[in-house]
Amino acid sequence: MSQSHQQPALARCPGCEEPLDTGDRFCGACGYDLSAVPTRPGDRPTMALTVPPAGPDGAPDHEAEAVRVRHDHRGAPGGAAAADAAAAAGGVAPPAGAADPHGAADSGDFPLAAPDPRTAEHAPAAPAVPASGAKVCVACRSGRVDPDGYCENCGHAQPRERDHMEQELDAVAAVSDRGLRHHRNEDSFAVSSTALPDGSPAVVAIVCDGVSSASRPDEASAAAASAANEALLESLPRGTHPQQAMHEAIVAASEAVNALAQEPAGAMEHDTHRHQNAPACTLVGAVVADDLLIIGWVGDSRAYWVPQDRSRPTARLTEDDSWAAQMVAAGLMNEAEAYADDRAHAITGWLGADAYELEPHTAAFKPDRPGLVVVCTDGLWNYAESAEEMAAVVPDDAQERPLHAARVLVGHALDGGGHDNVTVALLPFAVRPQGAGSAREAV
């Protein structure tokens, strides 16, 4: 008994993609002979070939290839026309079951020319790469930091540049840290070196502490440190005596801080209280030049002398402009009582437009032995107040490794509680063997 041949049921015309009705033998749109359509394989609509099958003469059989490509034209860019063009050009579709670059392999679907949206929607988005020169987030290491100081990728607040600062030259090093309690670093420093007219070196360290009860203390300390440093670098090479140069540098620093109080007319629109308390800071500086050690200060930032031979006596080289110091000088309290008082750190001298009177203190020393000059704010000396206590926390190799020693001293303050900003500069002092005696030339 003969068996009738069943035509394959097609939903669309293979030639023009027009929808078909059941039983159609010809396409009503293009006239395609539906009886000529071969039976579709039951597993895959493409043949697992990497090259077109050879024809009778050994050349590629483009007709067979055209049929295979047409079956895949749903995934080809441009639809059927593009698939036909690919067939005409001898293009070969990916074999069935082959690894697909977009992850469609072995999925049972036709290979896709575009990424499969089912997998693409779950793929993690690549972080934006910061433009060349842009600051990169310290947390995610990939996002760009916006002008407000936050990462545009993860939102992490970035540490401010002044929260921790370090600088080292050949003969001086300094470290400044925000501490553990303050929301910003109101200290500042400047270290530099130059040459005297005879060619001998001169090393400079300036440390300033902003007065927190004043407005913009961070700006005041930065302006004072920069102005004093620039003044010394200008006057020392001209042959100005280092002690006179230090006095002039403190005056220049005072003028720089005073200028901060002179705001443009519209400044008070943004801060109506800005002018009620002028910017202010303290200052202590040291210059090592021509076998001399010059110290200058206003306020309660300090300088200490720590000899290389720790069996020799240490010394504090400055006298505080503070309530406690005045009580001790007047004989009203001893030092222990005065500094235990809540008013101890109230300063009586500072740089600022509202200072009663500018009284720069300068002193010149001629040490007869090598040692180290420690220049610091009260954020450090609060945890090592006496000269002996300061010498005890200074590392033994501080003269050879001043930056390392400065880090150790800042760490000592942080370990002690870090209640204030901490800044310290270290200047190693070397003397020639023939130097004799130790003289204080002026106070």
Image (tube, rainbow, N blue to C red):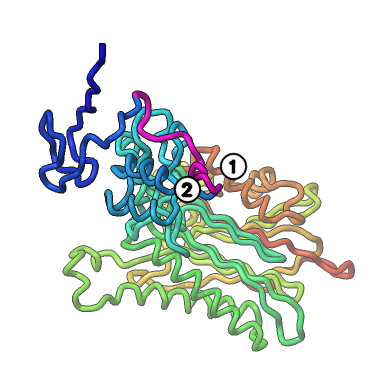
The x, y position of residue 330, in whole percent, is 48, 56
The numbered mark, 2 or 1, whose residue comes first in the sequence reads 2
Vertical placement of residue 104 versus 248, above or below: above
Residue in view at x 52 percent, y 58 percent: 301
- 93 lies left or right of 204: left
- Extreme residue toward the right, this view: 434
> Badge 2 is on which residue?
141
Which range of residues does the magenta coloring cover?
A: 42-58
Label 2 or label 1, whichever lies nearer to me, is 2
Q: Main secondary structure of the magenta part?
A: loop
- 37 lies left or right of 437: left
> Badge 1 is on which residue?
412
Vertical placement of residue 205 versus 182, above or below: below
Which image quadrant: the N terminus? top left
Q: Kindly state the secondary structure of the residue where label 1 is placed.
A: helix
Which image quadrant: the C terminus? bottom right
- Extreme residue toward the top, this view: 1
Does the image show residue 20? yes
Vertical placement of residue 429 versus 71, above or below: below
Residue kind at label 2, given as amino acid type = Arg
Residue kind at label 1, given as amino acid type = His
The x, y position of residue 288, in whole percent, is 69, 70
Task: Bin the neighbour count of mark 1 within 10 Å (Cα to Cα): few under 14, some 14-19, many 20 and up.
Answer: some
